[in-house]
Image (cartoon, helix red, strand yellow):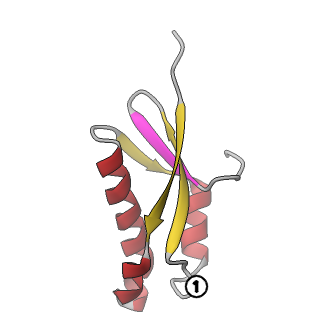
Amino acid sequence: MSSKTEEAVFSINLSRVKNAPFPDRREVAIRKIREKASKAFKGKRIVIGSDLNEYIHSNLGRVLKGRLKVLAVVEEDEVLLRLPGSEQR
């Protein structure tokens, strides 16, 4: 059996994350990314890739962009979110 994988690139508006208190910004950004992905891909498990997670946590909430482009790799029962142009680990 072959598993079908599709890829979709979409942008997520993270400008509201800057309204959150400084210590909570990373967690709010992750939550917003999960909410947007769960609305787009209903009924599938959302997995955040290590490169996207490292990008968000490396910015320390100060220089996080207002918009973030995310590559979604859609499989049968789960969606892997990662940064476009990055190697899969």
Amino acid bearing label 1 = Val
Q: Quadrant of residue 83?
A: bottom right
Stretch of the chain drawn in magenta: 78-82
Q: Quadrant of residue 20?
A: bottom left
User: Does the magenta-highlighted stretch encompass residue 86?
Assistant: no
Rendered residue at 36%/80% (across/down): 16
- In the depicted structure, whether residue 5 falls above or below residue 71: above
Q: Secondary structure at mark 1?
A: loop
Can you give x and y, in whole percent of width and height, for residue 19 in the image? 35, 88
Q: Position of residue 51 (x, y in %)?
A: 62, 58
Q: Is residue 39 left or right of residue 11?
A: left
Is residue 80 a member of the stretch shown in magenta?
yes
- x%, y% of residue 77? 38, 31
In this rendering, position of residue 27 left or right of residue 42: right
Q: Tell me which residue sits at (32%, 49%) in the image.
A: 38
- The picture quadrant where one finds residue 62 is bottom right
Q: Nearer the viewer, residue 64 or 26?
A: 64
Q: Is residue 67 above or below residue 81?
A: below
- Residue at position x 49%, y 77% from top? 66
Q: State the residue position of label 1.
A: 63
Rendered location of residue 72, percent (x, y): 51, 45
